[in-house]
Structures are given as C-alpha cells and as structure tokens.
Amino acid sequence: MPFLIAGSDRIALLREQLARRIADASGVRVLECPFEAVPLAEAFWWHPMNRSDVAHAWLRELLNGGCR
C-alpha cells in the first residue's frame, strides 16, 4: 500500500511494524493514527457448487492461512 500512495495526498492504515520497515523504501511518512482504530473482521463466502473444486479449495486454504 505505501508504494501506491507515495507521492499523493492519500493515506493508508497499516500495522506499525510493517509501515516502519518499508517507510524509507516507499518514500512515505509514518504518523500516529488520529483516531482509535477498531479491529477488522474479514470473511469470505462461496457458492456451494465450488466446495469440491480443487482450485477453489486451494484459494480458500491460502486465504485462510494468511489471515491467522
């Protein structure tokens, strides 16, 4: 995300640890969030006909693993 907003007047919310690691490389400033950030809840749904599709099962597993 920092590389997408660099050079613009836009903002992005990132985990502080990640933001600080790539701030110099992306050319953005890391600032304190001006409001209380609330936890995000992510979810994904799929049509039951895709339940046994091998490629779809792979994608679901990939998404599920990355969200932990």
Image (tube, grey):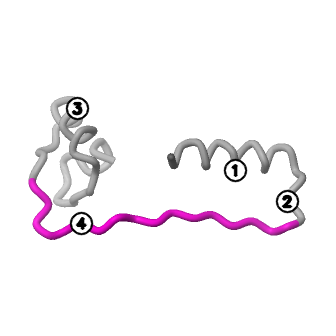
- Percent of width and height locating residue 16: 21, 45
Q: Quadrant of residue 11?
A: bottom left
The residue segment tinted magenta is: 32-48
Disc 4: which residue: 37
Rendered view: 67 above or below 18:
below
The main secondary structure of the magenta stretch is loop
Dots 1 and 2: beta carbons under 8 Å?
no
Disc 1: which residue: 60
Disc 3: which residue: 21
- Percent of width and height locating residue 67: 51, 49
Q: Residues within 10 Å of mark 3 (few under 14, many from 20)?
A: few
- Percent of width and height locating residue 21: 22, 32
Q: Quadrant of residue 29?
A: top left
**Residue kind at label 4, given as amino acid type:** Ala
- Percent of width and height locating residue 63: 61, 48
Q: Look at discs 2 and 4 and give the one toward the viewer.
A: 4
Q: Look at discs 3 and 4 and give the one toward the viewer.
A: 4
| Label 3 or label 4, whichever comes before in sequence order | 3
Q: Residues within 10 Å of mark 4 (few under 14, many from 20)?
A: few
Q: How far is the residue under mark 3 from the one under mark 4? A: 20 Å
Task: Identify the secondary structure beneath mark 1.
Answer: helix
